[in-house]
Amino acid sequence: MLIVIREGKTTYQECLEFYSEASEAAFLFDRSVIDRIDLIFKKSRDMVAVQEKLYPSGGSSGLPVGEERSKVTQKWSELHKWHTDQLAESKQFFADKLGLKNT
């Protein structure tokens, strides 16, 4: 998530790496942890799809200025905010799962 917040983008490869690494630890926790990991992965994957519409990785021009680009840009903004919010929410979520206090 930090790369999404810091750079405002991610890649399919980074999404897969996150999912692979996070899923390895999922067996230690209950279903809510797996659900959280799945949600983060799906939202990150959605962000990649939105980025591809705006700035295609193949180098072609993205959506032209207009209504569709504005809608896609709004979706990107919502996904970026969601990831930013998840930083604090996930910290508390996992602290609770681990029985940590004062986080």
Image (cartoon, grey):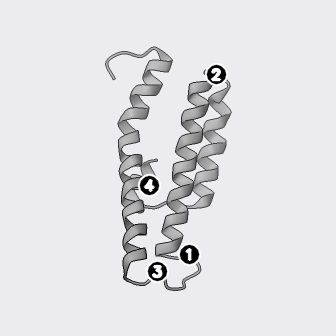
The mark found on residue 33 in the picture is none
Q: How many marks?
A: 4
Instruction: Name the kind of residue labelled 2 in the image.
Output: Leu
Question: Which one is earlier in the sequence, the residue at label 2 or at label 4?
Answer: 4
Question: Which one is earlier in the sequence, the residue at label 1 or at label 4?
Answer: 4
User: Does 98 sit left or right of 35 as displayed?
Assistant: left
Q: What quarter of the picture does the C terminus occupy? A: top left
Task: Name the secondary structure under disc 4.
Answer: helix
Q: Are marks 3 and 1 in contact (CB under 8 Å)?
A: no
The residue at which mark 3 appears reads as 63
The residue at which mark 2 appears reads as 28
Instruction: Name the kind of residue labelled 3 in the image.
Output: Leu
Q: CA distance from mark 1 to mark 4?
A: 16 Å
The residue at which mark 4 appears reads as 4
Residue 16 sits above or below residue 20 on the image: below
The 10 Å Cα crowd at callout 2, few under 14, some 14 to 19, many 20 or more, is few
The 10 Å Cα crowd at callout 3, few under 14, some 14 to 19, many 20 or more, is some
Viewer-nearest of discs 3 and 1: 3
The percent position of residue 32, horizontal first and vertical second, equals: 56, 26
Task: Name the secondary structure under disc 1.
Answer: loop
